[in-house]
Amino acid sequence: LVMFDARLQSYSKVVRDAKAMETELDIGFVRVSVGSLNESIEQHASAWIGGITKLLNAMARPELLAMHEETTDLTEALHRSPDTLEDLQFVLNQVADIGRRSMEVELHIAALEEKYRTLRMYEFEVPEEEASIIDGLHGSWGELCNAAKVR
């Protein structure tokens, strides 16, 4: 993520600098018009920003969907009715698994949140499905951990 952010920052700086640069420069007795060059540089840097954010999203999306699916599966497993001894053992194993993996999953969620924060910061249009999942993922995991503690 650091590499993505560093590249995105450098290309954003190029865009800002190109916008701020004068469109005509006086060099000695010659006046040079650089407006089209500035525009071209700005477009090229913006294209790189778009490509990098698209790549970051393509890498983050499968992680996000897998984490969402795992959280959903664990929630369903935790709320399974322990009608038999095997069912009770299964539910207790799920409770232990949730407790054991809690910190690891919270760190993974934080990393995913940071990836999507970076995408939003560089004005990448995050699909609505992904936005709603990432916005609620930390809360759903917290609820799951609390449910596992009282189960």
Image (cartoon, rainbow, N blue to C red):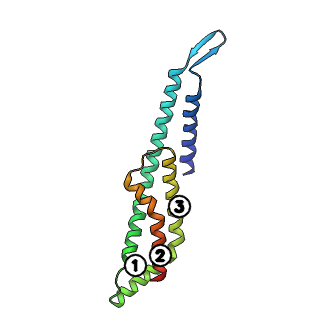
At 49% from the left and 70% from the top, the residue drawn is: 142
How far from the left and from the top, in percent, is residue 34? 55, 20
Circle 2 Cα neighbour tier, 10 Å, few/some/many (<14 / 14–19 / ≥20): many
Q: Going by the image, does 111 lie left or right of 126?
A: right
The reply to whether discs 1 and 2 touch (Cβ–Cβ < 8 Å) is yes
Q: How many marks?
A: 3
Mark 3 → mark 1, Cα distance in angstroms: 23 Å
How far from the left and from the top, in percent, is residue 64? 43, 59
Mark 2 → mark 3, Cα distance in angstroms: 17 Å
Depth check, front residue: 148 or 66: 148
Find numbered disc 3 in the image and state the secondary structure of the residue it sits on.
helix
Read off the residue under disc 2: 98
Q: What residue type is labelled 3?
A: Ala
Circle 1 Cα neighbour tier, 10 Å, few/some/many (<14 / 14–19 / ≥20): many
Circle 3 Cα neighbour tier, 10 Å, few/some/many (<14 / 14–19 / ≥20): some
How far from the left and from the top, in percent, is residue 38? 53, 25
Find numbered disc 1 in the image and state the secondary structure of the residue it sits on.
helix
Residue at the farthest top position = 29
Q: Which amino acid does label 2 sit on?
A: Ile
Mark 1 → mark 2, Cα distance in angstroms: 9 Å
The reply to whether discs 2 and 3 touch (Cβ–Cβ < 8 Å) is no
At 63% from the left and 14% from the top, the residue drawn is: 26
Indicate whether 17 appears above or below 110: above
How far from the left and from the top, in percent, is residue 59? 44, 52
Question: Closer to the N terminus: mark 3 or mark 1?
Answer: 1
Read off the residue under disc 3: 110
Find numbered disc 2 in the image and state the secondary structure of the residue it sits on.
helix
Question: Closer to the N terminus: mark 1 or mark 2?
Answer: 1
Q: Quarter-wise, where is residue 129 in the image?
A: bottom left
Q: Going by the image, does 146 lie left or right of 86?
A: right
Which image quarter is the C terminus in?
A: bottom left
* Label disc, if present, on residue 78 of the rendered structure: 1
